[in-house]
Amino acid sequence: MVPGLRPDDASVFVAENMAASKQPTEPNSSIPEYEFVNVNTKPFHIGSFRDEWLKRLQPRDVSFQPVDQDTFEASFAAEMGLGEETMAELRSVCRLDRLTVGRVPETEDDMIPEGEVILTINIYFPGNFEKFNYVRPHMTLLMTGSHTLAELRDAICCVSDLQVCGEFSSTPDMAPDFISKDIFKSAFFFFEGVFYNDMRYPECQDISSTTIKWTKSQNFPSFSQAKMEDTRFMDLKVKVGFPYLYCHQGDCEHLVIITDVRLVHKGDCLDRKLYPLLTHKNRVLTQKCAVCHVFISRWYTTRDQFAPSDPCLFCDKCFRMLHYDKEGNKLGEFLAYPYVDRGAFN
Amino acid sequence: MDFYRKHVKSDCESLLGRFQQTQSVRFEVFSNIWKEMKFVQIFSGKPTHKKRAFCRLVLDIAYCYFLPPFSFQIRVGGLYLLYSFYHCQTASTSEQLQIRVALKDWEDVKNFEKDAMDAQHLDVVYILKQLMICKAFQFTAMPTLLLYRTKRNEEKPMLCEQFIERASCPQELINTQLLEEMSNIYELYKNMKTNIISQITAPTNTSVNLIRKDIVSQLCSTVMEFYNWQQGRDIFDEHKNIYERTSSQQECSNRAMLLASIKSKAYGEASEASKSRRHRQVETNLTTQEDGSFLKERHSRVMKQSLRNRTDKQIHMLVWVRKP
């Protein structure tokens, strides 16, 4: 060994220098960043995202209360050590503002708290209709972080929920008793490998279990399950801009994309009772009755000897006038199904 | 709405280009240019149902100029643009759209504020704080709404090269202190190695030569070359010669001389002005055309146009010439 130089010296020297130079810190996964630029983000936890913002901001930055202009100028002058002359000059050079406030609720309890997270969610229409030229209308909903997935489910209007199964030519008055929404209540959301099932009602089944069993046999990464009604948006870990799934009625699947996540702002609607807030809904062309061309069709007939085409659509009045006599007896041969027009939610 | 994007961008860039030429960061200067260009008319002539979407587009475009990699002066221009757009939004929407700030950009905003405060740019700080006070900012996850648009072949957004901050990371990273430490470590390592090798193996065994010789001098000269290229000065050759000479001398005296030369270069070079003042330095490189072309030569290959394009161009020109 070299006299005067011990191996420890060199390694300590190196170690000290390594520690002194700044190592890049681990990227914080609660700060959303692009997975693909302008397409979607990497997954992040919504509650942690909110905490990260609140850590960086002062309470007055997220408050709904406007700051008085004079107070602001006084504190600015004090902070920067400016005299009145400079402040006057600044004031004249830089102009003033105009305040707008969003809708405020009547009671304090209904107010959305400051620092709450607002999510903008796009629901897309399923493309599983073959016969008619399907349009893909979508609705845009605003939700808060404290809302549960079940509340989102309730806000989604899909015509397949109103479908009635069965042939009702002999009993046209019984049709309204069998709405699908009441019979088939199961539904799930799928976010980042977790199926969130609706288990609020005793009739609800776990319809995701079939998919999960299948994936286990196919070497997919394992998926888990949770309850829709117990999961708030704040607890989710999701990607912004990435398509997810909402499935109900067994096979009616909708794309769900969370397009935006942000802190609530003074200019937003602040009434909690109005959320989930519908901000956009695509209108759909409605099919009118083949006879009067005025009312929206509610009956769909096939093999109908009275109808000009097969199949044919009728509104309720024209249907009954054509197919039943005054006593309500069925006339002729036909099969009739209750029809829910796609534009029923317009 | 994407149709407007290109045109709004070019309008903003022409405004910011004029602002850049004034070499000022004063809001007064900016607002004079704004008034001269009658920029507020950007909001006129839109049908009512498109006003909101257009305002959103305009704010999103202005937001880009507020963030790195643009130079401090351009970022100030971006801030003034945001401020002006925010207040000139048409009243008919009855709602003002906010400026979306993403969480990942907040640190850049804060650093910008700090730079402005350190340099006592009062109007910059005042305007930034004013925007915070009147709740002009919305604190979001990402700067724009994301709709999973993968199918569109969008052109990669081209950043205006003239606006981009001059890179100073190499100089900041490879400073005198680092070079001294590196040469210390290098000497220690070399001494240990020679002592161990002479005891174990034959001295001519090259399998233990794992690092570059003269790494410190090479590193220093590379950074100097980069810096001088940036400054447009051609004193690189001089430095190179100095380092070649030093590497051929004895180790002990070599170290002392190397340190001395490094220090002399460090004190000799023009120290980088702080970012908030850099726009006042005489920029000889990026704004003049010859250095611009230098940049292009180094970083891109000139693609020859296809025969078809060249033929089309020729025909087009012929037609144009022949028109009476």
Image (tube, coloured by chain):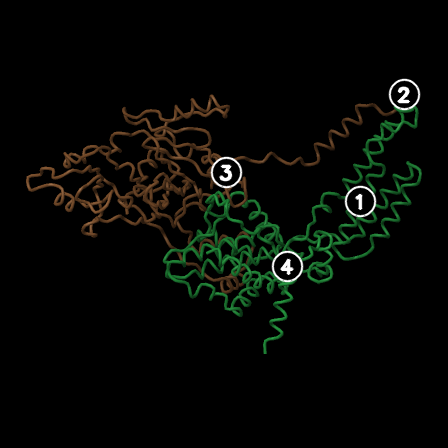
Chain colours: A brown, B green
In what element is the residue under mark 2? helix
Numbered tag placed on residue B220 in the rendering = 1
Q: Amino acid at mark 2?
A: Ile
x%, y% of residue A195?
Answer: 41, 28
Q: Amino acid at mark 4?
A: Arg
* Residue bearing the label numbered 2: B200
Q: What crowding class fits label 2: few (fewer than 14 Cα within 10 Å), some (14-19), or many (20 or more)?
A: few
Q: CA distance from mark 3 to mark 4?
A: 55 Å
* Residue bearing the label numbered 3: A52
Numbered tag placed on residue B308 in the rendering = 4
Q: CA distance from mark 2 to mark 1?
A: 34 Å
Q: Sequence-wise, which precedes: disc 2 or disc 1?
A: 2
Numbered tag placed on residue B10 in the rendering = none
Q: Are marks 1 and 4 in contact (CB under 8 Å)?
A: no
Q: Nearer the viewer, residue A320 or A46?
A: A320
Q: Sequence-wise, which precedes: disc 2 or disc 4?
A: 2
Q: Are marks 2 and 4 on the same chain?
A: yes
Q: Nearer the viewer, residue A191 or B282?
A: A191
In what element is the residue under mark 3? helix
Which of label 2 and label 1 is nearer to you? 2
Q: CA distance from mark 2 to mark 4?
A: 69 Å
Q: Amino acid at mark 1?
A: Cys
Q: Residue furthest front?
A: A305
